[in-house]
Image (cartoon, coloured by chain):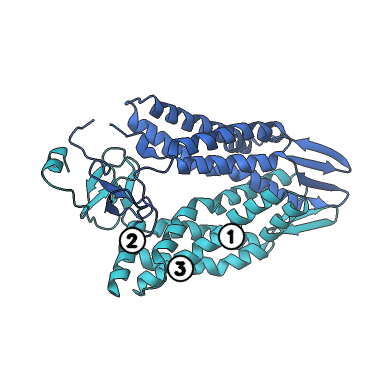
Chain colours: A cyan, B blue
Amino acid sequence: MTKSQLKTRAINPEGLIACPECDLLIRRTEPGPGVKCFCPRCRSILFHVKRNPVERTLILSLTGLIFFVPAMVLPIMTLNALGLEQSANVIQWVSALFRTGFHMVGIVVLFTVAVIPLLKLLLLFYVSMAIRFKADWHNLGSFFRFYQRMDEWGMLEICMLGILVSIIKLKDLAQISYGIGLFCFVLLLTITLLASVTLDEHKYWSSIKDVKSFNG
Amino acid sequence: MDKERLTAREAGLLNCLDCHLLTTKGDGALQMRCPRCGARLHLRKTNGMARTWALLITSLILLFPANLLPIMTVTYLGAKEPNTIIEGIEHFIQSGEYFIAIIIFFASILVPIFKVVGIMLIMTSIQRRWQTWLKHRTLMFRVIKFIGRWSMLDIFVIAVMVALVNLGTLTTITPAPAATYFAAVVISTMLASNTFDTRLIWEGA
């Protein structure tokens, strides 16, 4: 699109996209799987076409949901010093923060490690199911939008690094044994990361439009 | 910059930041919503500059208690020892865990400061209408946005330690006031990078 064309006719948004980071208008292309498209002006990633994005994301979000509850309620690790023992799961991290009077920190941990990761998996599963089976379910657009906006507030991978740092901090103080919860937590984190890697947001949005037109 | 290039704003189009659908701009009397995903449409994020400045100044103020007050208290055989973030890093250096010391130093001290100062620099450059280093400033913002959330690391370390080190009279760890301030710094800097509109960097390019 050029400025000289603008003078001669009104701009029809059909077949065009705008860069979300610099607002440049770009002609839309339909590249094959594996192709990454960058904005020619600011180099932001416009879209990244993935192979079988819907099926893979559907399976991954379902697997993630299976591991979610064990990762939250099974003990992550146990501390043992002079015969005294203390183990904790994710829910107990939050309750310990509440017990010591740090409610705000407790709420932050509860949301970033439990509530938002769960909501993200549920929303992804719901939207992927609807797209896979061409079902015209309610609020697909709002739900997927909600997923995208919550994405960065789920912090499982940062929490994992936090667990590793605490292990190093505690290893001289006492004996640590790892619980089955840690194993489930690592799986949940890996699956969540894989789901966001296989997710093709561009494809999802165009499918959400198709689902609406599918049923008139 | 290439004068032949056209932006969505110049073409009278609104770009949905959630689903990236382009819509023709109406007469402006009504609040427009995206026909595909229902998000509110704006030419630029509402009051982007003012909101981002407010959140950055909030973060800057909160950075002081977050770094100067103790973030956790270690009680060992009845003796209380409050620790600030810096003292925590010193402990790691003394015990020879240099790698962990560097990670904590980056996540808890460098990143929050770099984030606040970095976005402030970008905002100043927009208000002064600098037309250079556009690509670099956009890239800098992208990096800042990406690394910002990793500052939450210290909060998770505290959560794990407080729950686990609760061995009655032998030793306990409890959070200290800086924990709340520090979590607030991370949240307000994350909100600041969400209210900031990178398209402002490219305005008039």
Left or right: where B57 falls relative to B45: right
Q: Nearer the viewer, residue B71 or B130?
A: B130
Question: Residue under circle 1?
Answer: A115
The circle on residue A125 is 3
Q: Residues within 10 Å of mark 3 (few under 14, many from 20)?
A: many
- Relative vertical location of residue A123 with respect to residue A161 in this rendering, above or below: below
User: From this viewpoint, is residue B93 visible?
Assistant: no
* Amino acid at pointer 2: Arg
The residue sitting at 54% across, 38% down in the picture is B55
The residue sitting at 63% across, 43% down in the picture is B183
Quarter of the figure with the C terminus of chain A: bottom left
Question: Residue under circle 2?
Answer: B36
- Relative vertical location of residue A91 with respect to residue A165 in this rendering, above or below: below
For mark 2, name the chain: B
For mark 1, name the chain: A
Q: Nearer the viewer, mark 3 or mark 2?
A: 2
Residue B184 position, x and y percent, is: 62, 42
Residue B132 position, x and y percent, is: 32, 25
- State how far apart marks 3 and 1 are (Cα): 15 Å
For mark 3, name the chain: A
Q: Secondary structure at mark 3?
A: helix
